[in-house]
Image (tube, rainbow, N blue to C red):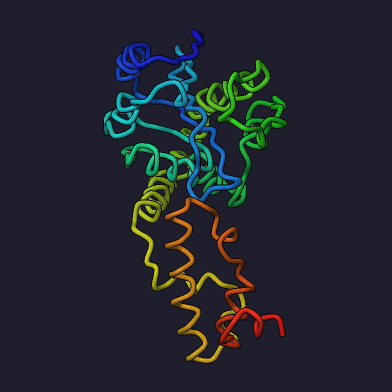
Amino acid sequence: MIKSYVKDYQSLVELCQQLAQSKVLAIDTEFVRTRTLYPKLGLLQVSDGKNLALIDPIAIDDLSPFWQLLSDGEICKVLHACSEDLEVFLTAGNCKPVNLIDSQIMMSFLGHGLSMGYAAMIKHLTSIELDKSESRTDWTRRPLTERQLTYAQADVEYLFQVYPTILSQLEQSGWLSAAQEETQLMIERKFTAIDEDTLYRNIKMGWKLDPKQLNSLKYLTAWRYQKAKHRDLPLGFVVKDNTLMAVAKYNPSNITSMNE
């Protein structure tokens, strides 16, 4: 297999021209979102079984050739546990993928639970133990270490290898269409605009509030989300849930009364 690190636009174009001839692509992303509302893309990984490429989005401003692959309905894209990857595609490329299937969802229809991890799946199917120690690394820092590169390559190398087995088992079980539908439902949810008027429903224990307090919570959660978007901060960095609950419940007139 040819492995490459793509860090300029022309190389990306040439890579994507080759990948466009593929029937199946294994794809993954590495990102950081510890201090931001939106994920910050640090690396793109892709393999067609012959070529395995790590694409550097820090070095390449225009990733449109890659986004075009995602929207090509003739190519099946397989990702594992791709909920956050979809957020990356939305925020970094405004790209809604077509003909994509999630191998975690596929494994769930084969009876392996709703949240089987990638390393667990690979071990189950190949007996290979993957090193996942780099999962919490800062993928936006450069240069990337050899260990990081090896970790990132494994995320698509083995996914491409095991996909035919998973697909065959799912076809035999009769659950393939259900897995495809479930993946598509997840895509639609991720690409549906957030309804700020319903965000209060995500606050735990909100049901304990009376109607007037609940209405206050509704406006408070919408306000927090707007601030988080504007400043690109996690919701909890703007105001924590328990603070929103307290304000909605007691309706303090000033900061001092909040401490009483």
Q: In this view, does 123 lie above or below 35?
A: above
Q: What is the quadrant of the C terminus in the image?
A: bottom right
Quadrant housing residue 6: top left
Image point 53% across, 70% down: which residue?
202
Image point 30% across, 17% down: which residue?
21
Tag count: 0
List x then y, in percent, for residue 221.
48, 71
Quadrant housing residue 223: bottom left
Image point 61% across, 20% down: which residue?
144
Image point 33% across, 12% down: which residue?
10
List x then y, in percent, for residue 164.
48, 27
Quadrant housing residue 204: bottom right
Point out the residue furthest to the top here.
Answer: 2
List x then y, in percent, for residue 11.
37, 11
Q: Is residue 146 above or below residue 109?
A: above
Question: Which is nearer the eye, 187 or 134?
Answer: 134
Q: In this view, does 204 lie above or below 212?
A: above
Tell me if 134 is positioned left or right of 114 in this view.
right
Question: Which is nearer the eye, 73 or 180?
Answer: 73
